[in-house]
Image (spheres, rainbow, N blue to C red):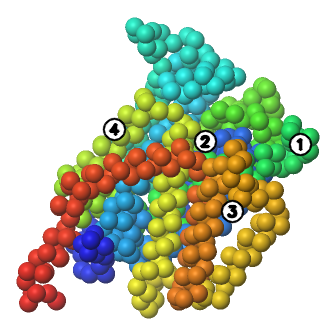
Amino acid sequence: MKNLLTRKDYNAAAAPSELKKVLGLGDIVFLGIASIIGAGSFSSLGEAIFAGGPGVIFLYIICGFACCFTAMCYAEFASRIPTAGSAYTYAYASFGEIVAWIIGWTLIMEYSFGNVFVSFSWSNYFTSFMKNLGIHIPEFLSTSYFEAQKGILSGTLNQRLINAWEHAPMLGNLKIIVDVPALCINLFITWVCYIGIKESRNLNNVFVLIKLIAIVLIIIVGSFYIDLSNWTPLNSETNLRSMMPNGFSGVMAAVSGVFFAYVGFDALSVLSEECKDPKRDLPRAMMITLVVCTTVYVLLVLVLTGMVDYRAFDGIGDPLSFIFNSDNANLIWMEFIISIVGVIAITTVLLVYQMGQPRIWYVMSKDGLLPKKFQTIHPKYKTPSFATVVTGIIVAIPIFFTEKTFILDFTSIGTIFAFCIVCGGILFYPQPKKGKGQFKIPFVNAKYVFPWMSIAAVATFYYLYPDFFATILEWGHPKEGEFRMSMSIYLLLLFGLAVLTFFKKLSLIPLLGLASCLYLLTGMTHNNWFWFLVWFAIGMVVYIFYGYRNSGLRKQNSNNSLAPDDQV
């Protein structure tokens, strides 16, 4: 057990990185915007609006605050430990090897499986673009098998899914339905990441500029087509108008789609070893990226929910072009422009995620937790070539065997879990004096602040939503059972944090980040947790039979214990 909890000292002298240091402040900000504005706005935004209605704007704000505190924790870690690996590296320094492995394994969910969802969305925009050019890609070649099957079984009205199922060719008793564009874009992005970080950076910067211009155009043009009544849709059960037609629990059900939009600043810390001045630039870039992207999301939600009734976004993978099609604003020229930009925008998201995963495997391999082959650096391109190819394969395979909603939930729960570990890590990581050029979270003693803030938050929530809060005590009510249990666990954890804070000298900002992220986990269903735990169990098997036996830190500690005179 002692070996499992041994922390790694990243302040010790380390071998120079083989990766190229080519990223400046502007490049890092653009990479952050590339992954945040794209994953959420061009893909998962439609899912979030359908689940939460116009009131989902409040969830974006909540997530923005949670990510603000979390970003500060990431920024301090990135400034003090400018090493590739992101939350994995920070967990190794804070909690020890076993927690680091869990986070490293979880980050595969965030980056690799996250790119499966984004690939599906890219396919939606690409087929829409080709349709506007007069080229029809058959639905059975631009839809995943399980998405079409799920839609048919649930009685979907989405014509694309119906056509895919009804017109698919047969191989024996099996319908041939596969998302070919999603597979093709994955191959292209893998090749771009393989040939070099500099080439990836240049391509990304151009794409981000195009994307930002298009989003400004959407907000300006869309604002002229807003119907204010769409912001307060009628609830068929209560016959009342509200921004939250499905209640606050409906808003929280959108947490997967919303939080998926904010994983970009995590991807930035993965690129530490390729930054020119990571201690200075990474913290600044994270905060700039978060402020810009949260503002953009709030404006986009207002425009989309004002233009189209939230219920129309069911199963829509290209929401920004959807609002301008012939059934809505009927601005075909805007639909055409946005379909082009959507293809570009989501390409940048794929690029950042596909760059992140190989670098996590690279640093895990350096620690001995994965085979040495993952450390392979291409002699010409200076990229983790083997890990990049493996990432491409891991993204490609699920495209055949899964669908968007499952991947979105699966990815989001892993991301929030990683954020909790990072916030908790700052609380327990040794606090040295601030070094020159380093970012450090301002220390505010939470002893007399956080407990009262927790009480005030619960009281305010009870005052604003008494019916919703009361469901926690209604154990016999079947509809709210999952969320009721999640909220009960959250309140117990919040109480435990408040008691711990009162007896320990803990910092307020990381505590707020941890409490916020734990709250967002209450939006996850039992099904989400089940598959997360299955993935966790597989990871533990891999660790026991390979990582634990080959751990570089464990071997180092064993050698030191055998030769104490050689210790420094």
Task: Nearest to the eye among marks 3 and 1: give it.
Answer: 1
Question: Callout 3: 10 Å neighbours few (<14), some, many (20+)?
Answer: some
Task: Nearest to the eye among marks 2 and 3: give it.
Answer: 3
Task: Nearest to the eye among marks 2 and 1: give it.
Answer: 1
Task: Nearest to the eye among marks 4 and 3: give it.
Answer: 3
Which image quadrant for residue 346?
Answer: top right
The amino acid type of the residue labelled 2 equals Ser
* Residue holding disc 1: 238
Alpha carbon separation for disc pair 4 and 2: 22 Å
Is residue 350 in view? no
The amino acid type of the residue labelled 4 equals Ile
Q: Which numbered dot is residue 43?
A: 2
| Label 1: element kind | loop
Seen at 8% across and 90% down, the residue is 565
Residue 425 lies left or right of residue 517; in this view the side is left
Residue 543 lies left or right of residue 139; in this view the side is left
Do tag 4 and tag 3 residues touch (Cβ < 8 Å)?
no
Q: Which numbered dot is residue 183?
A: none
* Residue holding disc 3: 62
User: Would you place residue 380 above or below residue 147 in this image?
Assistant: below
Is residue 93 in view? yes
Seen at 54% across and 82% down, the residue is 500
Q: Nearer the viewer, residue 296 or 146?
A: 146
Q: Position of residue 5 (x, y in %)?
A: 31, 73
